[in-house]
Image (cartoon, coloured by chain):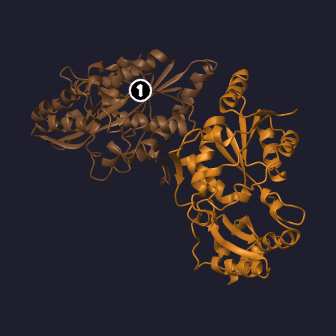
Chain colours: A orange, B brown
Amino acid sequence: MKPVIIRSIAELRHEISTFRRSNNGHRTVGFVPTMGYLHDGHASLLRKSSADNGLTVLSIFVNPIQFAPGEDLDKYPRDEARDMKVAEESGADIVFIPTVQEMYPQKRVTTVAVAEVTELLCGASRPGHFDGVATVVTKLFNIVQPDRAYFGMKDAQQIAVVTRMVQDLNMPVEIVPCPILREEDGLAMSSRNVYLNALEREQALVLSQSLSRVAEWIRDGLTASQVIARLKESISRNPLADIDYVDVLAYPDLSRPDDRQSLAEMNVSLLFAVAVRFGKTRLIDNQLLNPAEVGADVCFAK
Amino acid sequence: MKPVIIRSIAELRHEISTFRRSNNGHRTVGFVPTMGYLHDGHASLLRKSSADNGLTVLSIFVNPIQFAPGEDLDKYPRDEARDMKVAEESGADIVFIPTVQEMYPQKRVTTVAVAEVTELLCGASRPGHFDGVATVVTKLFNIVQPDRAYFGMKDAQQIAVVTRMVQDLNMPVEIVPCPILREEDGLAMSSRNVYLNALEREQALVLSQSLSRVAEWIRDGLTASQVIARLKESISRNPLADIDYVDVLAYPDLSRPDDRQSLAEMNVSLLFAVAVRFGKTRLIDNQLLNPAEVGADVCFAK
């Protein structure tokens, strides 16, 4: 069924509350917040929400306050017709597409700020980014009041930030992390991939290829800084790759693992995260691994 | 009917959702957040909520993060038995009394910060205070999910901050400001009045007495700074009064009125706010007036 397009907050609230009342409060609302230009990663979130909930709301909003000056706010790709096709095929019931004016009708003086988990990775590279994310996600949660919200693990730090915010502020919503979707050749799906020219697109494969070797390096008994060095080395072999960061952190608290220990000895989820520029396009990718689960037994012989 | 005491967030959510379901979503929830040691000002909020809503939730929580070091967190007055009596007499259905551990079970890294309207008055005197207020009110709103929340106008700046936060973050709650309640002699009711000794209690009357002359000074054609000077002069005649601030601001945006104009010429709500220490006790009081509504016609002859 074709999803309904709604552009006003009041109308969206009305539509959702009608749904809830008509079902005596027993059916749930799933929410997939996006910036649009949907790819199959987004579609997978919608399919999951649609399977889990009675109503699935997709939001498409390129949120200006999470872009720093000089970032790609103005050229961020948009294609509403294409997005509606993906939304329909993936089970969205309502597509909420507010204007900037609808979301920020007056000067905003309130900010939701999350410390610590925002200090490294993209938080360090993009000052203010996660304040903008936390603030708009809070607004959208208050508008949609979903039971569950679905986020892709490509933005692993975003999930860590939102999850912590939900805990700290007792938001009545369950955050559902969903796996990264990749193109057939391994490139993590991203709306920003459209910026890449053919050569950049080819060289960008080095991200997933390098990350895919992490399990092997863990089995080799390397420490965090040694794996970081290997990742940097592997990525840098590629002449177009301009590294923003490469890091290894415990997940989801994003604390730094003890570098005196080989990673293989750790029984904790570890996030191997990279951000690399190809030309003007900044791509991120990551892999989440628990060393205790990657067959690391050999290295305990150290 | 005796209200139910609930100390856990999970139980409170369960109780409220049972209420909502049993009424098919049509009855509303009113919420009165307090720090306890209830007086008739709090009781008036509860009575109003009880008249307006199907369920009234009172919270009692002395929120540590809104107190600065050296403030009166440790000695803030508490009396649960007395509070329960007021709650019962005033129509509260549920009294939520969480521990600090229940509200802050792990290190909090998320803050809701409101700029601008927090920069003057109590926000200037009590750094971090309104971040603490905005954060705990957000948490409580997310826990209770009320349709309406009731606040007393004695904390006029708090209402301005919370109202702006609700707008900026699209919180699905209506903020209902309620009038200041006063003792027979005019002292604004406050849990902190219990700190005053007999002499301080007597001299504290200067606050309401001085504020009661504001309408007259407006009719006299004074500007904001002239009224501020009169208020300061009137309060300072009192030897125990140690002024923290005296100010006049447009309400609720708390912008500064143009001092080249007499207040009588302004058709805008003005907040006349004072904070004064008597001994170790800091009291606040205020009066909200629209000069166009105080019979200011004579002064236009200036």
Q: Quadrant of residue B187?
A: top left
A273 w.r.t. B188: above or below: below
For residue B65, above or below residue A19: below
Residue B222 occupies which quadrant of the picture?
Answer: top left
* Quadrant into which the C terminus of chain B falls: top left
Question: Furthest-right residue in view?
Answer: A184
Q: Which residue is mark 1?
A: B177
Q: Position of residue A54 (x, y in %)?
A: 77, 32
The residue positioned 59% from the left and 38% from the top of the image is A105
Residue B47 position within the rendered picture, expressed as x and y whole percent measured from the top left: 39, 18
| Residue sitting nearer the eye, B162 or B243 | B243
Q: Nearer the viewer, residue B291 or A288?
A: B291
Q: Is residue B40 visible?
A: yes
Q: Chain of mark 1?
A: B
Task: Between residue A260 and residue A148, name the one nearer to us.
Answer: A148
Left or right, A162 with reference to A192? left
Q: Which residue appears farthest toward the bottom when viewing the image?
A: A302
Q: Amino acid at mark 1?
A: Pro
Q: Where in the figure is residue A194, as x and y percent of width and height?
A: 83, 60
